[in-house]
Image (cartoon, helix red, strand yellow):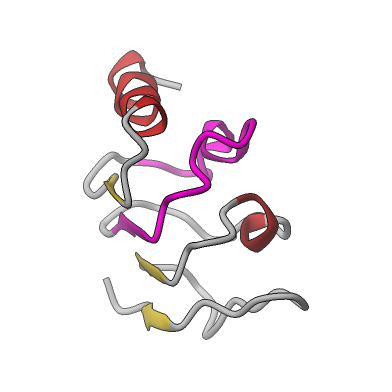
Amino acid sequence: MASELCKTISVARLEKHKNLFLNYRNLHHFPLELLKDEGLQYLERLYMKRNSLTTLPENLAQKLPNLVELRTAVSFVAYCCSTQCLQTFDLLS
């Protein structure tokens, strides 16, 4: 993972950000750093537009329990976990 991306995620974790912007990062895989520990439990909105993601982690809702909005361009219509569904989708990038 690029050091700039790691720094952005670390700052969001330390400062308990509710919004995280990872747009235009040329990501091909979901950054697993977002799912480590409990540091991003306050995250409500995750913006990942204009990346090259094709999948999301199955445990996304468990690891980011307050996430209600995910904006990304992925090749599927919806993501839903058995315990929580994301409330807002913007899959058109």
Residue 82 locus on image (x, y percent): 77, 78
Q: Is residue 30 left or right of residue 5?
A: right
Q: Is residue 89 above or below residue 49?
A: below
Q: Main secondary structure of the magenta part?
A: loop
The reply, left or right, for residue 51 in relation to residue 59 is left
Q: In the image shown, does 82 or 57 lie closer to the viewer?
A: 82
- Residue drawn 22% across the image and 46% down it: 24
On the rendered image, what quadrant is the C terminus found in? Answer: bottom left
The outermost residue toward the right is 82
Name above or below for residue 19 compared with residue 10. below
| Residue at 30% over, 57% down | 47
Looking at this view, is 67 or 92 the one in front?
Answer: 67
Can you give x and y, in whole percent of width and height, for residue 17 in the image?
Answer: 31, 43
| Percent x, y of residue 20 | 30, 47
Write down the region rendered in magenta: 27-48
Residue drawn at (59%, 60%) of the image: 65
Queried whether the magenta region covers residue 38, the answer comes back as yes
